[in-house]
């Protein structure tokens, strides 16, 4: 496995941290989820949920009430034998718990410590609470991008800021470990949802920095059309040669030389194309347009995605079988490596499932482990 031999302590609870640790765990890193006892009892999760929980597969789980000195001692010992820590508390919380970077660095100078927060560890917004939606709105992800054909603007049904932060955190941790192989020292990584989401709009933001204006969309950019079967097709043929191919497929080669979207002729072209697209189904248009070398995309409902032939070919849906829950499916891994496929090594653990085993690995005796478990139960 790519990251076999590395250990990450995952203190996060939300989607950004789960996205990060999910990727690292699938690539072979030992990920230990540290969860507060009592928040979610192991018996609260049915075997079927554990069996088909994609985001927490290939991980381990242990209970630690980090408010107690005993748990903090265990955490420090675990950190001394780990390679990375991932946390997503509000800035300042780890300091109050005695597990902030400064304290952990003293325990293990080689450890890479990554914090994920809404706005970063410093600055005027550092202490503010925010989720994906608030961050996305505050960083222009829902701003007007020009005239768009078809349906009005709506919320994107994906956690853009959360996912982006998780991806950047995973990249940061791997980069920190790579740097450590050269310098021998760990480091601190500060990941902000807001910063990561902003970077997703790099081309638009850079254009704004250069010209002072937000560039309007091109005349054929992000055009959404209603088709004969009531479904939608999108096309964004911004390249002249692709736009020309699209115009030929729809039977209007004369549209190929139309000026940009700020032209009075634009609305007339939109009206004509909308009529034409109603003559065939979404999938008919999709295959005709793509066969001609232009681009188009089916606006799919989520349930359609599962049966998409490209998804199946790329093995993005895994058929799995749990010893008690039976057969089911999990979402696959988004990268393919020539050295071997990413696979399911173990199903998602129930909360606290590996507490005793991890304590034993850290050198705690049976009586010490029993006492610790009793303390956790009282928490």
Image (tube, helix red, strand yellow):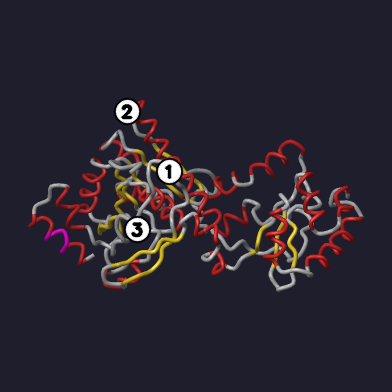
Span colored in magenta: 370-374
State the residue at coordinates (83%, 62%): 273
Please give the label number shown on residue 173: none
* Residue 152 horizontal side relative to residue 134, left or right: right
Whether the magenta-drawn stretch holds residue 102 is answered as no
**Of tags 3 and 1, which is closer to the observer?**
1
Residue 337, position as x, y percentages in the image: 43, 43
SS of the residue under disc 3: loop
SS of the residue under disc 1: loop
Out of 108 and 90, give the one closest to the viewer. Answer: 108
State the residue at coordinates (29%, 52%): 32
State the residue at coordinates (41%, 55%): 18
Please give the label number shown on residue 57: 3
Residue 223, position as x, y percentages in the image: 75, 58
The secondary structure that dominates the magenta segment is helix
Q: CA distance from mark 2 to mark 1?
A: 28 Å
Q: Which residue is mark 1?
A: 337
């Amino acid at each position: 496995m790519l990251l076999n031999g590395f250990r990450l302590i995952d203190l996060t609870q939300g989607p950004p941290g789960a996205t990060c640790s999910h990727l690292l765990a699938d690539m072979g890193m030992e990920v230990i989820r540290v969860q507060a006892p009592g928040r979610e009892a192991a018996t609260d999760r049915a075997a079927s949920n554990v069996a088909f929980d994609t985001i927490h597969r290939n991980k381990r789980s242990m209970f630690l009430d980090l408010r107690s000195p005993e748990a903090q001692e265990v955490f420090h010992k675990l950190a001394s034998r780990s390679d990375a820590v991932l946390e997503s508390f509000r800035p300042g919380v780890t300091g109050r718990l005695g597990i902030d970077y400064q304290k952990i660095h003293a325990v293990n100078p080689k450890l890479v410590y990554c914090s994920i927060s809404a706005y970063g560890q410093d600055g005027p917004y550092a202490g503010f609470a925010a989720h994906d939606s608030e961050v996305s709105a505050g960083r222009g992800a829902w701003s007007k991008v020009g005239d768009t054909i078809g349906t009005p603007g709506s919320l994107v049904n994906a956690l853009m800021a959360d996912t982006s932060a998780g991806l950047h955190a995973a990249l940061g941790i791997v980069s920190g470990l790579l740097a450590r192989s050269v310098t021998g020292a760990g480091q601190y990584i500060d990941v902000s949802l807001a910063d990561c989401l902003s970077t997703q709009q790099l081309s638009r933001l850079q254009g704004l920095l250069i010209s002072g204006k937000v560039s309007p969309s091109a005349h054929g950019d992000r055009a959404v059309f209603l088709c004969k079967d009531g479904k939608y097709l999108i096309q964004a043929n911004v390249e002249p040669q692709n736009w020309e191919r699209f115009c030929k497929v729809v039977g209007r080669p004369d549209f190929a030389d139309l000026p940009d979207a700020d032209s009075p002729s634009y609305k007339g072209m939109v009206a004509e194309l909308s009529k034409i697209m109603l003559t065939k189904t979404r999938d008919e248009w999709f295959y005709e347009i793509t066969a001609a070398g232009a681009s188009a995309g089916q606006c799919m409902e989520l349930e359609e995605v599962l049966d998409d032939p490209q998804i199946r070919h790329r093995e993005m849906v895994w058929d799995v079988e749990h010893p008690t829950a039976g057969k089911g499916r999990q979402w696959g891994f988004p990268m393919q490596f020539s050295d071997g496929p990413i696979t399911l090594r173990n199903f998602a653990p129930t909360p606290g499932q590996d507490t005793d085993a991890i304590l034993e690995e850290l050198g705690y005796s049976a009586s010490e482990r029993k006492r610790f478990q009793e303390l956790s139960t009282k928490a």
